[in-house]
Image: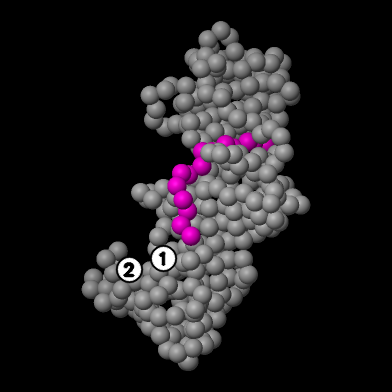
């Protein structure tokens, strides 16, 4: 194998593959990337046995086809520190020689046949969605997924595709985010598709999308999901377990509603939260016909009060929320105006941003 690579494009591919390379593993091959030179492209593959990626770099000149298995960190560091516009990579026995204009590195390789198979995207997509649209849906849901939960289904995002619609839902048990969107393809099979996709896989596909208009293709198998973009194929195991019946969590009997500007409400919540601490992480929201008063109190820090003008319909109510949970949702709303619907101090609130985003947030007890 011998290839001449554009250094910038090669570094981008290696950094992307590096997100998948296993940091600690008893299998040294999992700390490597597999380079395959063929068909006018250099394909870089990596896997940690849970997630796998194939990234195609077309900015190469292939002088001899072949494949090599190289340590990911050493190759990445050499390419990153190089000052050359192009680098050559040549396989010589059990070594790879990487040359620039004034530099030469020889690193030991491993047997590429020992590298686990990394799936490619074959056949028709189950469904497709514009890349920019998918990034928006991921941004509006991923933040609410559990970071580490014994209820494994909470560690991913539920993806439901049916007809021409796609729905992403996430929860950590204290809040729930739902974002709806449109698919690019004509229609799905009658039963549609449903899977719980790990957070890591969605973070990676979000990074892989660089053209908002280009489609991202999905294939969902019994225990895997495969994403495909113009440059890459990403494969991930699905999260095991049953996602909770999220429709039952969404309040349907709200009788109080606040309407406000998204940016203004975000600013008010952030200011009211300035004097909260980890021990007293709650903001009191008092709604009445004249508007909203936000208050927080901490024995260590002091007190904060913010008066916020808004439209409010329904009887007066006082409720406490975790301000971080509110601000994280308000940051991803893509509409200028939001509504916050309530029922009682001990019942969840329902935040809506347009027709396609909703967010359920559980109240907190305030002393």
Q: Is residue 269 above or below residue 190?
A: below
Q: Whole-percent x and y of residue 176?
A: 47, 62
Which quadrant would the C terminus be assigned to in this image? Answer: bottom left
Q: Whole-percent x and y of residue 210?
A: 66, 46
The residue drawn where x is 48% and y is 66% is 248
Marks 1 & 2, CB-CB < 8 Å contact: yes
Q: Which mark is residue 281?
A: 2
Majority secondary structure of magenta residues: loop
Q: Which mark is residue 56?
A: none
* 272 is within the stretch colored magenta: no
Label located before the other in sequence (1 or 2): 2
Q: Is residue 302 visible?
A: no
Quarter of the image where one finds residue 263: bottom right
Q: What is the spatial separation of the Cα atoms under label 1 and label 2, in whole angstroms? A: 8 Å
Residue carrying label 1:
324
Disc count in the image? 2
Q: Start and end of the magenta stretch? A: 231-245
* Element marked by disc 2: loop
């Amino acid at each position: 194998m011998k290839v001449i690579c554009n250094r910038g494009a090669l570094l981008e591919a290696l950094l992307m593959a590096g997100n998948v390379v296993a940091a600690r593993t008893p299998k040294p091959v999992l700390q490597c990337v597999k380079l395959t030179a063929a068909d006018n492209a250099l394909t870089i593959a990596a896997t940690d046995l849970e997630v796998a990626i194939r990234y195609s770099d077309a900015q190469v000149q292939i002088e001899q086809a072949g494949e090599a298995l190289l340590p990911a960190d050493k190759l990445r560091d050499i390419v990153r520190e190089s000052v050359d516009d192009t680098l050559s990579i040549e396989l010589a026995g059990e070594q790879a020689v990487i040359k620039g204009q004034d530099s030469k590195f020889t690193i030991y390789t491993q047997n590429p046949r020992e590298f686990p198979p990394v799936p490619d995207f074959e056949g028709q997509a189950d469904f497709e969605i514009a890349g920019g649209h998918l990034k928006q849906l991921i941004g509006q849901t991923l933040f609410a997924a559990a970071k580490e939960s014994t209820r494994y289904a909470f560690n991913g995002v539920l993806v439901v595709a049916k007809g021409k619609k796609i729905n992403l839902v996430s929860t950590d048990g204290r809040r729930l985010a739902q974002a709806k969107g449109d698919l690019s393809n004509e229609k799905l099979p009658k039963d549609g598709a449903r899977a719980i996709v790990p957070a890591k896989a969605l973070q990676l596909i979000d990074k892989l999308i660089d053209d908002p208009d280009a489609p991202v293709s999905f294939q969902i198998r019994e225990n895997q999901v495969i994403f495909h973009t113009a440059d890459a194929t990403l494969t991930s195991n699905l999260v095991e377990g049953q996602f909770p019946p999220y429709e039952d969590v969404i309040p349907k009997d709200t009788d109080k509603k606040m309407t406000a500007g998204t940016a203004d409400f975000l600013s008010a919540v952030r200011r009211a939260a300035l004097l909260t601490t980890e021990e007293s992480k709650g903001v009191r929201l008092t709604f009445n016909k004249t508007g909203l008063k936000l208050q927080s109190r901490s024995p260590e820090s002091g007190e904060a009060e913010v008066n916020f003008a808004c439209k409010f319909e329904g009887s007066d109510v006082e409720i406490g929320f975790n301000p971080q949970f509110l601000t994280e949702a308000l940051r991803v709303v893509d509409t200028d105006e939001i509504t916050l619907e309530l029922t009682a101090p001990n019942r969840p609130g329902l935040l809506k941003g347009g027709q396609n985003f909703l967010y359920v947030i559980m109240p907190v007890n305030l002393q």
